[in-house]
Amino acid sequence: MALISGEEIAKILLDIVKEVRENPEFKLECLYNAGAILVAIGLIKKIYTLRTIGEYILGTPSKLRPLLAYKYQLLGGIGELEEKIGRQIDATLNKILEIIEDIANKLKEEQVSDEIFIRNMGELVDIFSKTSTFRE
């Protein structure tokens, strides 16, 4: 059985964050990988908050993709609306990426327990409950 260190997992998560930040419109699907990694760690280590965080991150592309599409439909339209939607998407995505970075750093330091990830889970729940989609 191969052993995988927290440092190795952190590096992969941080690489995913970097890739998504550089080109979110085309790399948003990379968050599926980040979510799957966190779900797997949560299941293996029985850290259920990490599993739940992973499930939220798995849902991020589906939640943000309609907003990204709407953002581009607004180009050339009402400037204020275009700017507001753009800011909302950027702020939401940045916060999610910051949460992934925070988790990666905790994994690197091998700090893993439900208690450690509760704040991150609460932040994600808050983000998802406040972020509108245009499918609703």
Image (cartoon, grey):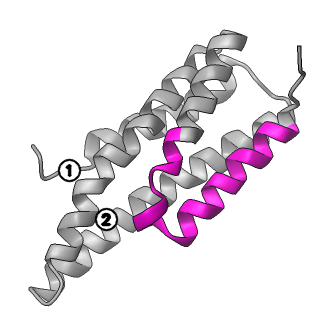
| Horizontal side, residue 21 vs residue 68: left or right | right
Give the residue drawn at x 55%, y 66%. Answer: 21
Question: Label 2: how many residues lie within 10 Å, few (<14), some (14-19) or many (20+)?
Answer: some
Q: Which amino acid does label 1 sit on?
A: Ser
In the rendering, which numbered label is found on residue 65? none
Q: Are marks 2 and 1 in contact (CB under 8 Å)?
A: no
Q: Look at the numbered disc 2 and give the secondary structure of its residue.
A: helix
Q: Name the residue under label 1.
A: 132
* Residue 48 percent coordinates (x, y): 57, 14
Q: Look at the numbered disc 1 and give the secondary structure of its residue.
A: loop
Q: Is residue 8 rendered magenta in the image?
A: yes
Question: Label 1: how many residues lie within 10 Å, few (<14), some (14-19) or many (20+)?
Answer: some
* Residue 17 percent coordinates (x, y): 62, 56
| Location of residue 113 with respect to 61 vertically, above or below | above
| Horizontal side, residue 72 vs residue 5: left or right | left
Q: Give the range drawn in magenta.
A: 7-32
| Horizontal side, residue 103 vs residue 7: left or right | left
| Location of residue 125 with respect to 65 vertically, above or below | above
Q: Earlier in the sequence, mark 2 or mark 1?
A: 2
Occupied quadrant, residue 98: bottom right
Foreground: 99 or 65?
A: 65
| Horizontal side, residue 45 vs residue 121: left or right | right
Q: Which amino acid does label 2 sit on?
A: Gln
* Residue 101 percent coordinates (x, y): 67, 50
